[in-house]
């Protein structure tokens, strides 16, 4: 229940998932209350238990990423830090980087920072009115100095999933590297190829993986060396002032957030027990139903892959299958911020409004004046939540 007594209908899972599986909260609390030790720092019983949690989490995430090497999986404090570690650890002065207009500011801002200081040259390729990027545009933007392609796997504004396999092929044929921001896909779309075919994958714990905040995932393909963005104690090679050679040690200086890793482990195990395909399918079906209903309300514009007309196809391989469960829309006569405020006031529906930390996509969507209203459906939402959204928006009209 909300403070006003209205049923809380949380539809902002693209920002952070809620609620989490009960197992996540139990694991998080147990690690904080009963273990209370730093992983990799000592040999007493609780410290060994802490190290075992981190090791099990590394293995579980590696399996989730397509059975990659666990020793190439690191846990930064969040996805934004992980993306900065990847970008700053890879590019050098004079490099050219290609990003897309559908990307999140977690990659665009560090790239813009480097460009503004003359360190790199940056090309941002366009997207269409649904947020979809043509891989051919990446090929056309290629230069001799191109080192890195950066792409949000799924748009956090429209839910469109980019063709990572084709982007990887284009990039690798030209000798470059592909960095995939999987914040809106990992945990929703099963990883059938190692790292979705990318060279580096970054994702947060707290979104579709259903874990707590405080942990992120950074996977780097073997053979790629990242210069450490942060230096410090690792619990290993402590008699040297040099950072260790081992990848996980170099990428994880400082004390890890053990409760966050315990919660992430429980979340990944829960997803495995439920099947990511099945969880993602249920979420997409709710999003498709909401988009269809919204599209039938006069004065409402649905933006993204569900706006092509007709009933969205959520069968495996269908048009709705290659999406995150995100529905963006606008309501004629209302600013998106007004819509989100009224939806909570009259129906307890909690959505996000505005530009969604995606600075470049909105001119392509025609939403540069105020952004969109965004509803994102998680595994614990139901058809009642869809009905509540539709009824509330209908009242506005």
Image: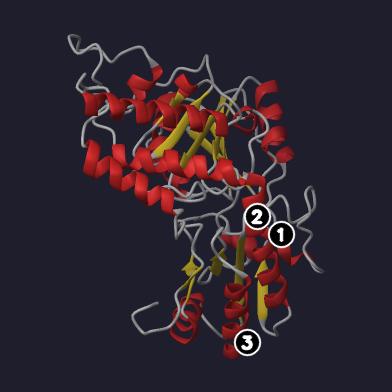
Does 191 sit above or below residue 208?
above
Q: Nearer the viewer, residue 264 or 142?
A: 264
Mark 1 and 2 residues: CB-CB less than 8 Å, in contact?
yes
Q: Residues within 10 Å of mark 3 (few under 14, many from 20)?
A: some
Res. 186 visible in picture: no
Label 3 sits on residue: 394
Quadrant showing the C terminus: bottom right
Residue at 45%, 19% (x, y): give it: 71
Image coordinates for residue 2, horizontal then vertical, percent: 38, 78
Q: Nearer the viewer, mark 2 or mark 3?
A: 3
Which numbered disc flags the more N-terminal residue, 1 or 2? 2
Task: Indicate the position of residue 175 as horizontal and vertical percent values.
Answer: 63, 19
Distance from disc 1 to disc 3, alpha carbons, whole Å, reads 22 Å
Residue 353, image x, y percentages: 48, 69
Disc with the residue nearer the chain's start (2 vs 3): 2
Q: Nearer the viewer, residue 123 or 357?
A: 357
Indicate which disc residue 305 carries.
1
Apparent side of residue 347 relative to residue 52 in the rendered image (left or right) = right
- In terms of depth relative to the viewer, which is nearer, 359 or 13? 13
Say if mark 2 contacts mark 3, CB within 8 Å: no
Q: Disc 2 marks which residue?
A: 131
Quadrant location of the N terminus?
bottom left
Question: Nearer the viewer's eye, disc 1 or disc 3?
Answer: 3
The answer to whether 313 is drawn above or below residue 347 in the figure is above
Provide the secondary structure element on which disc 3 rests. Answer: helix
Is residue 237 visible in the rendered image? The answer is: yes
Q: Residue at x 73, y 52 (%)?
A: 321
């Amino acid at each position: 229940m909300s403070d006003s007594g209205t049923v809380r209908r949380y539809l902002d899972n693209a920002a952070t998932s809620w609620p989490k599986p009960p197992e996540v909260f139990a694991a998080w609390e147990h690690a904080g209350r009963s273990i209370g030790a730093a992983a990799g720092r000592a040999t007493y019983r609780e410290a060994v238990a802490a190290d075992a949690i981190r090791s099990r989490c590394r293995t579980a995430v590696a399996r989730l990423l397509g059975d990659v090497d666990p020793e190439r999986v690191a846990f930064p404090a969040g996805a934004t830090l992980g993306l900065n570690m990847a970008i700053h650890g890879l590019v050098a002065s004079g490099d050219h980087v290609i990003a897309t207009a559908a990307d999140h500011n977690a990659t665009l801002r560090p790239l813009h920072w480097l460009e503004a200081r003359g360190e790199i040259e940056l090309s941002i390729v366009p997207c269409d009115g649904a947020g979809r990027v043509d891989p051919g545009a990446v090929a056309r933007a290629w230069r001799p100095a191109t080192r890195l392609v950066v792409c949000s796997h799924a748009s956090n504004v429209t839910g469109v999933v980019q063709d990572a396999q084709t982007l990887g092929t284009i990039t690798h044929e030209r000798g470059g590297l592909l960095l995939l921001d999987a914040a809106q896909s990992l945990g929703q779309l099963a990883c059938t190829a190692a790292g979705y075919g990318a060279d580096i994958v970054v994702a947060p714990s707290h979104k579709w993986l259903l874990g707590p905040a405080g942990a992120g995932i950074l996977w780097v393909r073997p053979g790629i060396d990242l210069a450490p963005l942060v230096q410090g104690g690792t619990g290993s090679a402590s008699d040297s002032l040099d950072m260790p050679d081992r990848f996980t040690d170099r990428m994880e200086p400082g004390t890890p957030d053990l409760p966050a890793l315990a919660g992430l482990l429980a979340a990944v195990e829960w997803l495995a027990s439920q099947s990511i395909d099945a969880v993602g399918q249920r979420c997409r079906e709710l999003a498709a139903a909401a988009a269809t209903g919204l599209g039938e309300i006069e004065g409402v514009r649905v933006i993204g892959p569900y706006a092509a007309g007709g009933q969205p196809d959520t069968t495996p391989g269908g048009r709705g299958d290659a999406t995150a469960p995100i529905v963006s829309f606008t309501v004629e006569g209302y600013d998106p911020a007004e819509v989100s405020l009224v939806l909570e006031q009259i129906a307890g529906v909690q959505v996000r409004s505005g530009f969604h930390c995606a600075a470049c996509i909105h001119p392509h969507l025609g939403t540069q004046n105020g952004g969109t209203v965004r509803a994102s459906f998680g595994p614990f939402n139901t058809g009642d939540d869809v009905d509540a959204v539709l009824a509330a928006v209908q009242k506005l009209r």
